[in-house]
Image (spheres, rainbow, N blue to C red):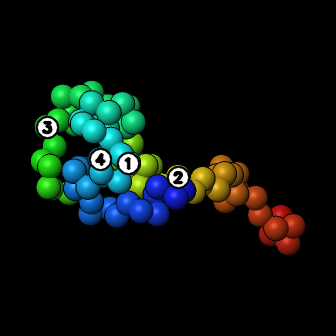
């Protein structure tokens, strides 16, 4: 949690490597569990892509959609006793 507090979502790849104490793209790829070629293709000073591995490292967790309430197929067929 200490590392994620130091990381900004607009951080560049170079700044992220410096904050994590990583020497090159291969180490960053290992931490993110991504191919080295993919990480090497990112610009040094551009914003990081919004990949799930990066957002998780940055502490930005996506919330799962709320489960829909169960649908009762007989809800509209049941009538009150007065109508019967």
Circle 3 sits in a helix, a strand or a loop, which is it?
loop
Compare marks 4 and 3 and give the one earlier in the sequence: 4
Q: Are marks 4 and 1 in contact (CB under 8 Å)?
A: yes
Residue identified by numbered label 3: 41
Quarter placement of the C terminus: bottom right
x and y percent of residue 43 in the render? 12, 47
State the CA–CA distance, disc 4 to disc 1.
5 Å
Circle 4 sits in a helix, a strand or a loop, which is it?
helix
Q: Residue at x 64, y 56 (%)?
A: 69
Residue identified by numbered label 4: 17
Position of 80 with respect to 25 (left or right) is right
Compare marks 3 and 2 and give the one earlier in the sequence: 3
Q: Which of the 4 image quarters holds residue 75? A: bottom right
Front in this rendered view, residue 40 or 55: 40
Q: Which of the 4 image quarters holds residue 32? A: top left
Above or below — where is 39 with respect to 59?
Answer: above
Classify mark 4: residues with Cα within 10 Å, few (<14), some (14-19) or many (20+). some
x and y percent of residue 41 in the render? 13, 37
The residue mark sitting in front, 2 or 1, is 1
Residue identified by numbered label 2: 64
Q: Are marks 3 and 2 in contact (CB under 8 Å)?
A: no
State the CA–CA distance, disc 3 to disc 2.
30 Å
The answer, for residue 22, to whether it is visible in the render is yes
Q: Residue at x 16, y 43 (%)?
A: 42
């Amino acid at each position: 949690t200490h590392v994620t507090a130091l990381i900004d979502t607009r951080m560049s790849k170079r700044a992220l490597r410096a904050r994590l104490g990583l020497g090159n793209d291969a180490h960053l790829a290992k931490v993110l569990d991504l191919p080295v070629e993919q990480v090497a293709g990112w610009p040094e000073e551009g914003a990081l892509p919004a990949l799930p591995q990066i957002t998780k490292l940055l502490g930005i967790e996506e919330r799962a959609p709320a489960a829909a309430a169960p649908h009762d197929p007989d809800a509209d067929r049941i009538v009150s006793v007065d109508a019967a």
